[in-house]
Structure formats: structure tokens, C-alpha cells
């Protein structure tokens, strides 16, 4: 019996292949390769697509060698979303550097989009008209990269997110496809009709022939030939959606928070796509065959980066893990509040001009008060998203499942539970994105089904909220006042 699937996690700073044992229900091997970024101009972020592919293939082969090709049932893919690759359909070679999701070169273009088009973007795609998403990046490439424009005119251009490029390369050009979750991040895909939207394609000047076919997350995407074996590629999702599935957030009201450099919260809204009136994003959560599950998403630009700032720029501690004991050395933040707006405020404010703020300082303020205030600000940011999600959807929050580096901080997780008023469930396996890709692959190949996904996720610890929440709610209200001051400083 084939007992393994491989999760290929093509992230922003690294590509990893992780070998998942379906019987033992755990990862047993990992091969990781760092991927470089380049910053040719202020606000620009690029990567070499060939480097991404070669390192992905190398990592895959390392895992295949570790288990033996005959024992591998399939390969699932999770990837950084919104990033764009332009390549030659005949040769498979990129024609320019990949434009990465963080790139802001198209900000001015997006600001000039007419209001009526912005309204259509929200209505059809669930997204905001922002340089974060793929459409304006594709528009820029077709306008500024001569080879891309020439290939487009000849019908020989391929444009897609990282998953579609990897699928094309790994299948030796036989499959040009993406999945619904990645397509839903392009600002070109109608998430209700599940197809590329002709009006938006025309506005951004994107030829339909250059885009991949959009399929379900569990569709088979072809085969990877390795070591005298043909291994199916099946189970594809954007990284945050893969984490939603890996965390087994399968019911309406289930939410997950990833605490990384930023903070990403996804909230399952079931078969109904909830339109946000609060500045959140509506997106495809995952698709199992013909079943579509939608989600609301909110992203906070700075979370773990705030802890890194305390460590690296302020010198408050040498190891980020020390922030927990320092925060617990005082009973509260002493009236100090911190707004983590180093690079502006994301959802639900969307104010790129806002800047970080530390307020409420007195002569008695200590290092511990500031550390605690910074950690609390991360929990308050998630509370902002939770309030909006429940209002927009009319669905109560069942609980939160957490992952990411800062989820290891027990103080932060307990404070998060207290502020939200729901339990925070931390899993034993923190690689939720890779686990989601592995499980989507298993479901696609008939080795598991949606109802059994929860069996693969094991809780390590559950943080239950305090019974008396009045004090936490008052503190959250005071934090909101601090946010308003940060918004004022941005004007």
C-alpha cells in the first residue's frame, strides 16, 4: 500500500517538501530550500521563478528518495498567493522575474481605478482593488515586458500564480491549471460563477488564453515523473486556505489564525459567500469536488514583526520566546497601549499611511509593560477581525485554531482567548499549511475524505477564556482609542 503523500509548500522565503505518513498521521521527513528575493526599486519585490522550480524539484526528489517512489501516493501543493509568473508556453521558460505579492509597483494604477470598476471587483471577486492582488501585476507585465507582450500576441504566453507555474513545470507542460482558491486571489475571477470574468479581463487587458484553467482543490493536475515512477499531483490550495483545511475548520463559524510576520485570520462561512461591509475579503476557502466552501479573510500587516522589533531594534530581549516571561512579570500593561502599524494598518482599516503608536506611558512604565502591550496588541488586532467577521456573516465564532511562530507563546494565546471570548486550540502539528496540502491530496486520491480530516489534527493545548470578561472588553475599547490616534497621525 502506498502510505505517503508529499506536501510541497512553496512559500515566500523557502520551498519545502514534507513527507506525510498517512498511517502514522504525521510528517516524517522534510527537505527545505531557501528562496532569495530581490528589490530592484523601492517597493518592488521579485523572485527568480526558475529558482523556485529547481528548488521545488530538488526538495521533492529528496522526499521521494527518503520513502521510495513506489510508496508515494501523490503530491499536494500549497503556495504563496497573488504572486505572478510570466512564461513561454512552448519552452516553459520565464520571460521576466516573478512579481511577488508584497510588490507595490502598481499602487498608483490601483488608486486610479474608477469607482464603478472597484465596485465590480468587490462584487465579483470579494477583493479590494489593491496592488496586493495579481491583476494589476499582470497588467504591468504585459505593458512593460516586451517578450511577454510578443508571446501574448502569438497566443504563446502563460501567466499564473506560483502553483500553476509549478504544475506546468512538474508535468512537463502537459497541465496548465490552477485551483479555485488561488484563482480567487487574482482580482480576475468571479468567485460566485467560478470562472474568469470577461469584463475584468478586458479592463486589466489580460487575454483569457494566457490564464490557466481553474479547477477544484481536489482535481488531479497531472503527474510528476521521478525515479521511474509517475506520481499524481492532486490537492492544491493557496497557503492560507490550505492552513484552514489543515486545521480542520470544516464548519460554519470555525476560524483559524496564523501568527507569522503578519496575522491572517480565515473564517468559514459555509456554502454562502458573505460579502463584507467592514473591509474584509471574501474568498474561496476550499473546494472538494463540486462542493465550494467560502471564507472571510482578514490580514494584519504586523504581528510577529512587532516582537522582532522589540528584540532587534529595541534590544529588550535576545530570544523572542523571552517575551512571554517578561510580559507575565507584570499583572497588566500599566495603561500602555501599542498599535502595530509599522507599515500601515491592514484589515479592517486599510490605511497604509498609518504609523505605529506607543501611548499611555508614565514614569512608572517599565520594559515589561511595553512588552506586554505589544503582545496584547496582536490579540486586539485579531479581535478587530473577529468582530467584523461575525457582523458581516451573521455567524457566531465557534472557536479559533492557531498556528504560526507566535502561537507558541502561552501568554499571547491565553490573552487571545480572553479577549475573543472563545477557546484557542493549538495543535501538536504546527505546519498547518503543509498538513492542509497533504490532506487535500489524500482526499483527491480517495485515501481520506472530508469527514476524516479532523482525525489527522491533534490538539496539543486548549486555552479557555476567562469567565469574567468586562476588564478585557474595557481594555479592548481603550486599544481602539489608540488605533484612532494612529489613524490621525497618518493624515
Image (cartoon, grey):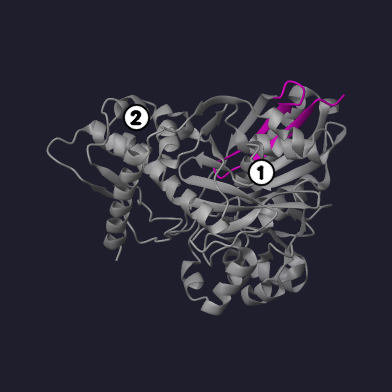
Chain part drawn in magenta: 1-25
Q: Quadrant of the C terminus?
A: bottom left
Q: Is residue 187 among what the camera can see? A: no
Place residue 143 in its image quadrant. bottom right
Please tell me in which quadrant of the rendered image residue 250 appears. top right
The numbered dot on residue 323 is: 2
Q: Is residue 468 left or right of residue 266?
A: left
Question: In which quarter of the view is residue 273 placed?
Answer: bottom right
**Is 29 situated above or below 357?**
above
Sequence order check: which comes first, mark 2 or mark 1?
1
Image position of 323 (left or right of 289)? left
Q: Specify the quadrant that holds the N terminus.
A: top right
Viewer-closest of 432 and 410:
410
Classify 10 Å Cα crowding around label 2: few (below 14), some (14-19), many (20 and above): many
Residue drawn where x is 64% and y is 68% of the image: 124
Q: Secondary structure at mark 2?
A: helix
Instruction: Report the front residue among 418 and 453.
Output: 418
Q: Is residue 157 magenta?
A: no
State the residue at coordinates (64%, 40%). 249
Residue position for label 1: 251
Q: Residue at x 87, y 32 (%)?
A: 228
User: Label 1 crowding class (10 Å Cα cut-off): few <14, some 14-19, many 20+?
Assistant: some
Q: Horizontal and vertical percent for residue 264?
A: 51, 46
Give x and y (percent) for residue 109: 50, 72
Amino acid at each position: 500500500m502506498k502510505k505517503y503523500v508529499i506536501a510541497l509548500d512553496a512559500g515566500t522565503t523557502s520551498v519545502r517538501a514534507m513527507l506525510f505518513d498517512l498511517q502514522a498521521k504525521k510528517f516524517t521527513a522534510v527537505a527545505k530550500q531557501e528562496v532569495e528575493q530581490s528589490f530592484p526599486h523601492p517597493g518592488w519585490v521579485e523572485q527568480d521563478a526558475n529558482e523556485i522550480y529547481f528548488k521545488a524539484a530538488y526538495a521533492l526528489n529528496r522526499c521521494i528518495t527518503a520513502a521510495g517512489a513506489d510508496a508515494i501516493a501523490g503530491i499536494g501543493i500549497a503556495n504563496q498567493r497573488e504572486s505572478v509568473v510570466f512564461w513561454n508556453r512552448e519552452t516553459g521558460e520565464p520571460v521576466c522575474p516573478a512579481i511577488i505579492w508584497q510588490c507595490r509597483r502598481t499602487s498608483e494604477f490601483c488608486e486610479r481605478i474608477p469607482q464603478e470598476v472597484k465596485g465590480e471587483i468587490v462584487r465579483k471577486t470579494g477583493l479590494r482593488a489593491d496592488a496586493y492582488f495579481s491583476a494589476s501585476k499582470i497588467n504591468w507585465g504585459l505593458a512593460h515586458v516586451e517578450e511577454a507582450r510578443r508571446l501574448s500576441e502569438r497566443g504563446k504566453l502563460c501567466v499564473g500564480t506560483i502553483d500553476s507555474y509549478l504544475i506546468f513545470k512538474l508535468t512537463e507542460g502537459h497541465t496548465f491549471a490552477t485551483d479555485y482558491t488561488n484563482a480567487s486571489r487574482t482580482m480576475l475571477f468571479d468567485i460566485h460563477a467560478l470562472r474568469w470574468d470577461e469584463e475584468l479581463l478586458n479592463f486589466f487587458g489580460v487575454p483569457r488564453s494566457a490564464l490557466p484553467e481553474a479547477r477544484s482543490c481536489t482535481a488531479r493536475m497531472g503527474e510528476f515523473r521521478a525515479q521511474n515512477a509517475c506520481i499524481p499531483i492532486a490537492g492544491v490550495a493557496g497557503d492560507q486556505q490550505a492552513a484552514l483545511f489543515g486545521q480542520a475548520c470544516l464548519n460554519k463559524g470555525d476560524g483559524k489564525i496564523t501568527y507569522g510576520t503578519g496575522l491572517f485570520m480565515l473564517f468559514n462561512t459555509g456554502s454562502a459567500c458573505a460579502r463584507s461591509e467592514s473591509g474584509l475579503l471574501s474568498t474561496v476557502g476550499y473546494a472538494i469536488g463540486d462542493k465550494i466552501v467560502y471564507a472571510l479573510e482578514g490580514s494584519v500587516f504586523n504581528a510577529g514583526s512587532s516582537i522582532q522589533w522589540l528584540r532587534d531594534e529595541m534590544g529588550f530581549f535576545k530570544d523572542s520566546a523571552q517575551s512571554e516571561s517578561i510580559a507575565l512579570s507584570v499583572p497588566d500593561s500599566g495603561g500602555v497601549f501599542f498599535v502595530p502599524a509599522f507599515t500601515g494598518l491592514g484589515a479592517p482599516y486599510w490605511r497604509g499611511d498609518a504609523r505605529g503608536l506607543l501611548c499611555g506611558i508614565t514614569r512608572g512604565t517599565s520594559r515589561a509593560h511595553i512588552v506586554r502591550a505589544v503582545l496584547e496588541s496582536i490579540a486586539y488586532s485579531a479581535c478587530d477581525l473577529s468582530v467584523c467577521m461575525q457582523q458581516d456573516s451573521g455567524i457566531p465564532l465557534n472557536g479559533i485554531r492557531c498556528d504560526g511562530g507566535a502561537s507558541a507563546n502561552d501568554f499571547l494565546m491565553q490573552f487571545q482567548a480572553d479577549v475573543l471570548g472563545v477557546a484557542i486550540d493549538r495543535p501538536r502539528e504546527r505546519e498547518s499549511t503543509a498538513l492542509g496540502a497533504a490532506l487535500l491530496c489524500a482526499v483527491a486520491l480517495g485515501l481520506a475524505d472530508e469527514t476524516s480530516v479532523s482525525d489527522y489534527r491533534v490538539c496539543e493545548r486548549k486555552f479557555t477564556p476567562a469567565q469574567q470578561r468586562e476588564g478585557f472588553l474595557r481594555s479592548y475599547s481603550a486599544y481602539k482609542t489608540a488605533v484612532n490616534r494612529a489613524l490621525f497621525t497618518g493624515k
